[in-house]
Amino acid sequence: LTLGSLPVPTNAFQPFLMDGVTRPTIVQRLGSFIAPMWPLFRAGFLSSTVGYGIAALLIYSRSVLFPSVVTVTKPINVWHASLYTGCFLALVSNIRYQILQGVVEPFIDRVFRQVPMVYGAMIVLV
């Protein structure tokens, strides 16, 4: 994983870079938080644009086909909703991923590795 030309760990809490020897600097750790933001934003923005767009199209179609039906739904701004969803994914999902993979999963691995049934259940639950 790289941020520009800077190699970064796949997780901010990862003890070593992908080579298994080099310890990441503070800048590389921050980079590992920033690097996945664009792909996460893009995924959230595009998927919600499609989802909100289809929903808006269906609501509009219903109002054209059945003008006597009074709708409870309010029209939404697809652009704003998609932008919000993309930002949410880039920030919140990224933070969740960093904490789960960097803190919670190693704890589960250390504590429950000796009990495979509990270990498997914990990984699935988290």
Image (cartoon, rainbow, N blue to C red):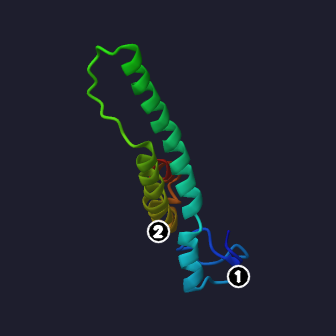
Q: Residue at x 50, y 42 (%)?
A: 49
* Mark 2 neighbour density, 10 Å: few (under 14) some (14–19) many (20 or more): some
Task: Please tell me whether residue 96 is drawn above or below residue 54 in the rendered image.
Answer: below
- 19 to the left or right of 125: right
> Front-most of 101 and 8?
8
Q: Residue at x 39, y 26 (%)?
A: 59
Q: Residue at x 44, y 51 (%)?
A: 85
Q: Residue at x 53, y 74 (%)?
A: 13
Label 2, label 1: how many angstroms apart (C-alpha)?
20 Å
> Front-most of 12 and 64?
64
Q: Which residue is mark 2?
A: 103
- SS assignment at label 1: loop
Q: Position of residue 35 (x, y in %)?
A: 59, 68
* Mark 1 neighbour density, 10 Å: few (under 14) some (14–19) many (20 or more): few
Dots 2, 1 in contact, CB < 8 A: no
The disc, 2 or 1, on the residue closer to the chain's N-terminal end is 1
Residue 3: mark in rendering? none
Q: What kind of residue is marked 2?
A: Val
Q: What kind of residue is marked 1?
A: Val
Q: Position of residue 110 (x, y in %)?
A: 50, 66
> Front-most of 111 and 3?
3
- Do we see residue 125 in this rendering? no
Among the 4 quarters of the image, the one containing residue 52: top left
- 84 to the left or right of 72: right
Q: Position of residue 102 (x, y in %)?
A: 51, 68
Task: Please tell me whether residue 12 is drawn above or below residue 78 in the rendered image.
Answer: below
Q: Which residue is mark 1?
A: 21
> Front-most of 117 and 85?
85
